[in-house]
Structures are given as structure tokens and as C-alpha cells.
Amino acid sequence: MSEGATTAAHDVLLVGGGAAGLRAAIAIAETRPDLDVAVVSKVYPMRSHTVSAEGGAAGVMADDDSIEEHIYDTISGSDWLGDQDAIEAFVNEAPRELLQLEHWGCPWSRQDDGRIAVRAFGGMKKMRTWFAADKTGFHMLHALFQTSLKYRAVKRYDESFVTRLLVDEGRVYGVVSVELATGRIRAITAKAVVLATGGCGKVFPFTTNANINTGDGMALAYRAGAPLKDMEFVQYHPTGLPFTGILITEATRAEGGWLLNKDGYRYLQDYDLGTPTDKPTLRSMELGPRDRLSQAFVHEVEKGRTTDSPWGPIVHLDLRHLGAKLIDTKLPMVRELCLQYERIDPVTDLIPVRPVVHYMMGGVHTDIDGRAGLDGLYAAGETACVSINGANRLGSNSLPECLVFGARAGRAAAEDAAAAPAPPAAIAAQVSDETRRLEHLLARDTPLDDGVARIREELQTTMEDAAGIYRTGPSLEKGADTFQALRERVGAVGVRDTSPSFNTELVAALELENLIDIGECILRSGLAREESRGAHQRTDFPKRDDERFLVHHTVRRDHDGNPSVDRLPVTITRWPPGERTYGR
Ligand SMILES: Cc1cc2nc3c(=O)[nH]c(=O)nc-3n(C[C@H](O)[C@H](O)[C@H](O)COP(=O)(O)OP(=O)(O)OC[C@H]3O[C@@H](n4cnc5c(N)ncnc54)[C@H](O)[C@@H]3O)c2cc1C
């Protein structure tokens, strides 16, 4: 690594090769074929977390559904914190994007008459979730990846880790990256950069997210001075496998699965899920919103009605009554995951589950075209917060969000890059700085009794204790205090492995720096929000408080390097705040 940095130059640079990054790349290649586009990804694109999405992607399609209803479900699901102009654009454009994917080769599951099949999903009052069995993310990503290959203008830097944005006078001009196979540091300049780095589930100990989901793009933007938004809203998914956190998709409940406590009782009937029980429901109570289901689990623990496991309390998901035929045709991956990771067969056995962190509603603050807080900087997908998800995302809205806003960010970045100035010479000094910083990290002695893995584990438990399903002011304060000490340890940590090739310890150390920034932003934003809304439940402020908190929180790094929280109005157009209800 001591040989100094090499340099490459492109017009537009995408950081991330998941659904959002690849959709943006295609949009750029289609809108401005004259531009040179690069996709940098820390893993091979097909290994991005999108690949593991199981359940499906929402878009209005059925005759008995309407754009208005999908908009309303999303606004209500967001507990009125989603921006209504963004939600309207999203719902309008999602069906077109999903159909486009079909034309690019995505094999959507069909009804018997050949029309595209849709399934019910939590918090959606109509069936509007398109799916490709329970491997939706795999098929979507495959279709996008193959399509991106046909554009010569799209170059790729696979297995390259971006460590810093290059910024001069408020404009972003590219990144510094480490090529993982060789350890070579490479500056990649561009006239516009789109961050599409996905979520940050790894800030918590139990998560459905891949190990690579460490909030890198959010941290890159934050350190460069761009604001993050809605960071206090972290979604738990009620059904993850207890040890690994592997997701058992909501589609299991959409197909009729039940949640049972230790007495074999469908305990959700004892809780207010916002579903009117006096009316016939399209779906079972198990399809209430994710936050309410996760909260019900905590109450079951308190009542002593859960089963103990080595990984803490659990409940069971029962699919046995669905039968082998349905499970094999509509939920084949669930059966495969259970057999391989738990040695159980859902056709005959109960599946042990617990709530696990699943999705980040917050992220890099953007406008409706992905513009982030610095010129030339864009964000899309889970790393961005536009915000359509507000305080709580509805399942199956995220994949189409990646498509709609990936395409929008791509088009806007292309126009911007076509008119932007060339990167100035001044950024060379930043590249040298970053090269020195990385070399220092490799040269620094790490205390023998400490290290990346230990600090990361403590960071994750601190987050769970401070900002789990339920939070309080004191728990968040305590977490923030612990973070001060953790930050000092992160600052002192070195990397023992000095090999240039696939240095996973170096990658883990860089990711840890990102986790600590993101975790702190979550805690500080959570402390500032003295109310309960969607996924942010404070037992010391149990009610939603529209008078004081119908606002987004943005968080920015101040001059001393500390997070500083500010407020931003929520865009309300046609749907005034109301009560959040589900079912019909
Ligand atoms: C298990 C699981 C199941 C899900 N199921 C559904 C579902 O059924 N329906 C739904 O709507 N949503 C679902 N979601 C959510 C949805 O899949 C994600 O929000 C979405 O796929 C995120 O896509 P993305 O393009 O934003 O990021 P990702 O797919 O996570 O891709 C991130 C990319 O950024 C790159 N990257 C990250 N950091 C760096 C760095 N420092 N340098 C270089 N590259 C970097 C990675 O290599 C990767 O290519 C699910 C999520 C999980 C975890």
C-alpha cells in the first residue's frame, strides 16, 4: 500500500452495485450514452444484500386496487412522517418500474391465467406485492445486473472499498477506494457521485442484514458534511431465526402462517395492532405492521409467555397447516433456510423466531431526485432517506423504492455531470491524506487486549440496550456515554494483518469507523425525539406528539466532530395526519 494511490477518472460514479446502484447505472447509460459511468462495489454486485430479499415488491396492479390506496397505506404506515410528494411519485412510478424489470428478464410469479400474481403484505390493505417465488431480490438483481452488462459505458470496480468522498468547496468530485485483491489505493474521480450502499443493520447484534451492511455510504456522506435524516427510525422484523438473524419472510404470514407463544396460543389477538377486529380481514392478524408485532413480542416476554433459547427468548412461527405443496411452490427458500440453518422442516416442525433489526428508515437526506446535501452528491436505495418510509416502512416498498429513486437519482446525476466542472487539482491533497491515514491504520500497534471484533460486539450490545424495540431518555443517554468511550478505543485500534491481499481485518476496521458514526447519529436523533411514533417507541413518552414532533430530524457533523440534530418540516400535501390503522 505504500506505493501511493493510482487514479482513474469517470463522469458519474456509483458507490454500490445493489438494486439502487445498478438501476441508477442503467438510467445514466440510457439517458446520457455519452457519459462514462463507473460502479464501485465492495462485493461482487450479485452478492449485494438485495439478493437476499425474499417477499416481493409493491406496485399497484390488480383491478380492485388504486394508486390512492397505495399512497394512503404508505403514508399511514409511515405514521405520517413520510413526505407525501415523494410517496406520490413513488407509488405512481413503481408499477412502471416493475413492468420494466419484467422486460429485462425478471420472472415474476404468475396466476393460473398467466397474469402477474400479487400477494398480501403487512400494512398493505390490498394485495399488491409482486414476487418471484420467495427469491424476489435474487431475480430482480439478476435482471438488473444482466441489463447493466449490455452498456459499454458502464465500468466496474468489483471488490473495491470506498473509504472517503473527495470534496472541494462544497462539491463532490469522487472517492478514494481500496482494491481488496491487491490492497492498492485508488482515487476515482467523477463529476457526480451516487451513494447506493444499502443499510446499516450491523449496528445491532441481531439482524437480517448481511455482514456488509455497515452504513458505509451514510458515514461517508456524514463525514463529508452532508446531513442524515430520520436516523432514529430502525425497523425490527418480527420473524428472524434466533442465532443467525436470517429472515423468515413476511410472505410466510401472507400465505397464512401463525405466530404462537409457548402455550401454542396466537398471542397477537391480545394486542392492538391497529387492525379493526370487527370487520372481516383479508389477512390474518399476523400481517399487522412490523413495529407493532415486534412490540407485542416484548410484552409476551414480560408476561413470561415466550420460550427460552440460548439466544434469548423466542416464539414460534407455524406453517404446518399450509402443507408441503404450498410451501414448496411459494416458500421454497424458507424450507431450505430452515433445513440448512436450524435442521428443522417447516412442513412438520415449528420455526423458532425472534424480532431482529431489519431495515433503516433513515439515511442520507435527499430530495425527490436523490440530491443530497452537497453539490454533485446523490443517494438512493436504503442508504438514502427521501423519505417515503417515515417512521415505519411497509414491507415490499423498499425494492421498488430502489428502482424508482435509483432511476431518478441516476438521471439527475447524469444531467449534473454533463454540465459540471472537471475535478480540481486541489483534491490531490485529500487523496494523499487518505493514503497516509490508511497506511497509519496498518502500521499502528493495536492493544493486545482489544481489537475490532471486541469493540464491534460492545457497540452492538450498547445499541440494543439503548435503542432497541423500546427506548427511554436514560437508556439513550447511557448509550451515548458508552459511545464516547468506544470512540476512543476505535481511534486507537490498529490492524494486525498487514497483508495487501483481501485484508478482511482492515475492512472490518474501516467498517467499525462507520458503525460508530451511524450508531451515534441513531442515539442522538432518538434522544431528541420525545414521543413514540412508528418504530421509535419511548416508554417515557408513549404517545405520538404531532404538535412538537411532526418533523424530520436531520443530523450533521459539527465543527468538533459531534452530531448536531436539527429539524425539517414534513411535506404534507393532501393527507392530513390521522390515526394509523390497518386491515379492512
Ligand atoms: C433479508 C432481507 C430481506 C428483504 N426482503 C425485502 C422484500 O421482500 N421486499 C422489499 O421491498 N425489501 C426487502 N428488504 C429490503 C431491501 O432488500 C433492501 O432495502 C434493498 O435491497 C437495498 O438495496 P440497495 O441497492 O439500497 O443496497 P444493497 O443491495 O445492500 O447494496 C449495497 C451495495 O453497496 C456496496 N457498498 C457498501 N458499502 C460500500 C463501500 N464502502 N464501498 C464500496 N461499495 C460499498 C455493496 O457492495 C453493495 O453492492 C429485505 C432486506 C433484507 C435484509
Image (cartoon, rainbow, N blue to C red):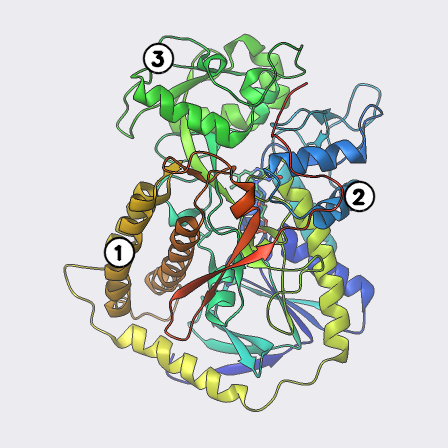
Ligand 1 closer than 8 Å to the CB at disc 2? no
Q: Is residue 552 above or below residue 433?
A: above
Query: Mark 3 is on which residue type?
Result: Lys
Find residue 262 and name its label. 3
Mark 1 to mark 2: distance in Å? 44 Å
* Mark 3 Cα shell of 10 Å, populated few (<14), some (14-19), many (≥20): some
Q: Position of residue 228 (x, y in %)?
A: 52, 59
Q: Quadrant of the C terminus?
A: top right
Mark 3 to mark 1: distance in Å? 37 Å
At mark 1, the secondary structure is helix
N-terminal-most mark, 1 or 2:
2
Are the residues tagged 3 and 2 within 8 Å (C-beta)? Answer: no
Query: Mark 2 is on which residue type?
Result: Asn
Mark 3 to mark 2: distance in Å? 44 Å
N-terminal-most mark, 3 or 2:
2
**Residue at image mark 1:** 481
Kindly tell me whether residue 148 is visible in this rendering.
no
Which of the 4 quarters of the picture holds residue 10? bottom right
At mark 2, the secondary structure is helix
The residue nearer to you, when weighing 408 against 478, is 478
N-terminal-most mark, 3 or 1:
3
Query: Mark 1 is on which residue type?
Result: Asp
